[in-house]
Amino acid sequence: MSLRIFNTLTRSLQPFTPIEPGHVRMYVCGMTIYDLCHIGHARMMMAFDVVQRWLKASGLQVTYVRNITDIDDKIIKRALERGITIRQLTDEMIAAMHADIGALRIEAPTVEPRATEYVPQMLALIGALEGKGLAYRSGNGDVNYSVRKFEGYGKLSGKSLDELRAGERVAVQDGKEDPLDFVLWKSAKPDEPPEAKWDSPFGAGRPGWHIECSAMSCATLGTTFDIHGGGADLQFPHHENEIAQSEGAHGQALAHFWMHNGFVRVDNEKMSKSLGNFFTIRDVLKQYDAETVRFFIVRAHYRSALNYSDAHLDDARQALKRLYTALTVATPLDVEIDWANPFAARFKEAMDEDFGTPEAIAVLFELAGEVNRSRSIQNASLLKALGGCLGLLQADANAYLQSGAGLDEATIAGLIAERAAAKAAKDFGRADAIRKDLLAQGIVLKDSASGTTWEAAV
């Protein structure tokens, strides 16, 4: 293969060859599911959606595993706050996640394991680590990992034990022998609901976060697989701890390639729930159509920071319109991509260099320009087919351009209903804002005694 991937483990671009010829096994750390997903989460899932799409377009079979963490301190706290069971909360949030990322055309993974379904595998892994002297039971009932007994800890993040010691704090009443150690099994607390506890050889309790991914990845893909991915914030300590656990237990590399996507930033700060500067996917989709949001994310390289603003989304919408306009000049057919075509060859060259979507999208614009000049159905068909490798340009072009930059009728109807509710509540500021937002996207509202209708602006 000509594909090269930036491997966080080696900090370099490396030629990619699957362990098993023709078959790629990839694990990506998914969502801790206690609230709605925001655009930062969408960026992570979109990055690896593009990765698996390109691997498939390159003729490879892909087994893509993206987990769900459905037991966690935040999940327990939120369920108790809402007065519902943990399962009710996680089922609700998983359904919301599927709806939101489905709107962005993020394809479902091959396997989507829930942590609570793999507790036996987690317990077996903890037992193996204890048997090798890498885990110990503390006086408070927890089981911890002994970081200093694993040679090579810090190789993924580039952090030495001396550097980690410089920033450590003294472990007080947490049962750890060393502040660097991390928990594998948390003993049950009296105030936690029964559904947050499992019986185990270590006593009643629940798994730590890090052990969950080690167990799920190895159970679904084997003890060594091709690609492990996630957000840059997971590189340390989560992925570092996964390596220590999995390689400590099995004595072999967990993954050959480690991939990490960059943050979404707002005013030069990472978008996160803890900072309160996040925008949920569904709130953004009230203002922008799903394909515009997808295009906004995809046109930035997955490892780069992505700056979120209305101005950048507005620019993405206009750019996407230009591509769709080219598809109205000549009606495309569904075709297989001829990779010998010069445009297709340059698109492939860009994607084969660490999934270079900015350069690949630049090729799409060059090809769109050629379509506008030549009115060639062949070129229009190629434009649509190459766009499909990124999950773009698959809608009917005329319908997209005439429906308010791609806002679908269900989204428009939802906004009209929200505006009606705002007017009924005498929140006329919000009602007027919705009308102006729709007008900015090419949708004109018409109020009458019988209700509100809409049409595309001419």
Image (spheres, grey):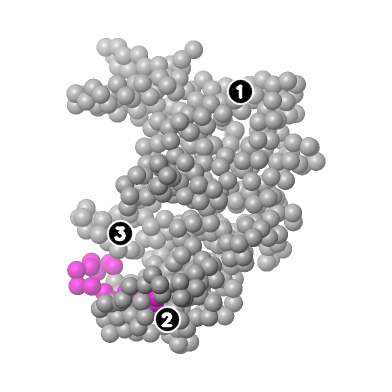
- Which of disc 1 and disc 3 is earlier in sequence? 3
- Figure check: 111 above or below 454: below
Place of residue 134 in the rendered image (x, y in percent of width and height, measured from the top left): 45, 83
Which residue matches tag 2?
146
Task: Please give the name of the residue rendered at 53% of the width and 26% of the height, measured from the top-left corner.
Answer: 318
Image coordinates for residue 374, horizontal then vertical, percent: 75, 21
Residue at image position (68%, 35%) is: 363
Q: Which mark is nearer the camera, 2 or 1?
A: 2
Which element carries disc 1, helix, strand or loop? helix
What's under tag 2, amino acid-wise?
Answer: Ser
Amino acid type at image mark 1: Thr
Q: How busy is the neighbourhood of tag 2: few (under 14 within 10 Å), some, or many (20 plus)?
A: many
Residue 273, placed above or below residue 456: below
Task: Describe the element under mark 3 as helix, strand or loop.
Answer: helix
* Mark 3 residue crowding within 10 angstroms, few (<14) / some (14–19) / many (20+): many
Q: Residue 141 location, x and y as percent?
A: 29, 81
Residue plotted at (60% across, 62% down): 11
Q: Which residue is mark 1?
A: 325
Q: Quadrant of the N terminus?
A: bottom right
Query: SS of the residue at dot 2?
Result: loop
Pointer 3: what residue?
75
Amino acid beneath label 3? Ile
With 262 as the anchor, is 444 left or right in this view?
left
> Residue placed at 30% from the left, 77% from the top?
171
